[in-house]
Amino acid sequence: MSAKPHSTSGTSAVFISGSLSITALPEPVVERLGTILDRQLSVLIGDARGVDRAVQRILCDRNSQSVTVYCSGDAPRNNAGKWPVRNIPSSALRGTAAFHIPKDMAMAGDASCGFAIWDGRSRGSLANIRRLAERGCFIVIWLAPEERFIILRSDADRSEFLVSPLCRTSS
């Protein structure tokens, strides 16, 4: 099933992404998800294991309806809330990281802001942060190894973050 991102008139869409290695979300991340829901932002999320699946479970438990699941395959691998799906075709080999790049690019292009839950190593998560930064989006990053949020509000914030040692070691 293919659908456009669910949105309510006048709301923004947040691209939530994160590392495959993160399967449990800490309380500060759960609280931030609550804020997203309280602000009635539409959520764009992928269908992977790890952060995608963990976030989907929370959104489902909270009966969130403003969610669109993006996938590259014929059907999403995970869709906890049976939300609308946006299928993004990919010509890359199924099962590779490259297979999911068009989906990630579409989510970054459709979003007005981002929330990344990052293990500090995942190249895919960093690529999503870069995509949002290139568009000048507001980005909240949960940096799991340091258990802290990084907020990228301005072009200067985004530029400084992207040239930081943290990003260089993940590239």
Image (cartoon, rainbow, N blue to C red):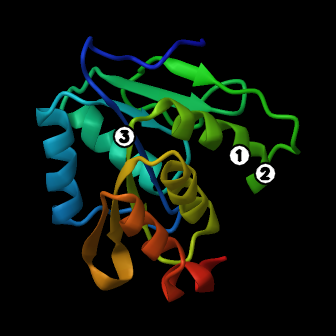
Q: Residue 33: x and y, percent?
A: 22, 47
> Which quadrant holds the N terminus?
top right
Q: Badge 3, how many Cα within 10 Å: few under 14, some, many 20+?
A: many
| Kind of residue sitting beneath label 2 | Ala
Q: Which mark is residue 77?
A: none
Label 2 with label 1: CB-CB less than 8 Å: yes
| Kind of residue sitting beneath label 1 | Ile
Per the image, label 1 sits on a secondary structure element best described as helix
Per the image, label 2 sits on a secondary structure element best described as helix
Q: Is residue 55 above or below residue 45?
A: below
Q: Is residue 40 visible?
A: yes
Residue 57 shown left or right of residue 86 in the figure: left
Q: Tell us which disc is closer to us: 3 or 1.
A: 1
Q: Residue drawn 60% across and 86% down?
A: 169
Q: Residue drawn 43% across and 55% down?
A: 51
Q: Distance between the Cα atoms at labels 3 and 1?
A: 20 Å
Q: Residue drawn 44% across and 75% down?
A: 160
Q: Residue 118: x and y, percent?
A: 44, 67
- Quarter of the image for residue 47 reads top right
According to the picture, the residue beneath numbered tag 1 turns out to be 101
Q: Is residue 102 above or below residue 81?
A: below
Q: Is residue 38 above or below residue 97?
A: above
Q: Badge 2, how many Cα within 10 Å: few under 14, some, many 20+?
A: some
| Sooner in the amino-acid sequence: mark 3 or mark 2 | 3
Q: Residue drawn 51% across and 68% down?
A: 21
Q: Is residue 119 visible?
A: no
> Which quadrant holds the C terminus?
bottom right
| Kind of residue sitting beneath label 3 | Gln
According to the picture, the residue beneath numbered tag 3 turns out to be 56
According to the picture, the residue beneath numbered tag 2 turns out to be 98
Nearest to the observer: residue 40 or residue 72: 40
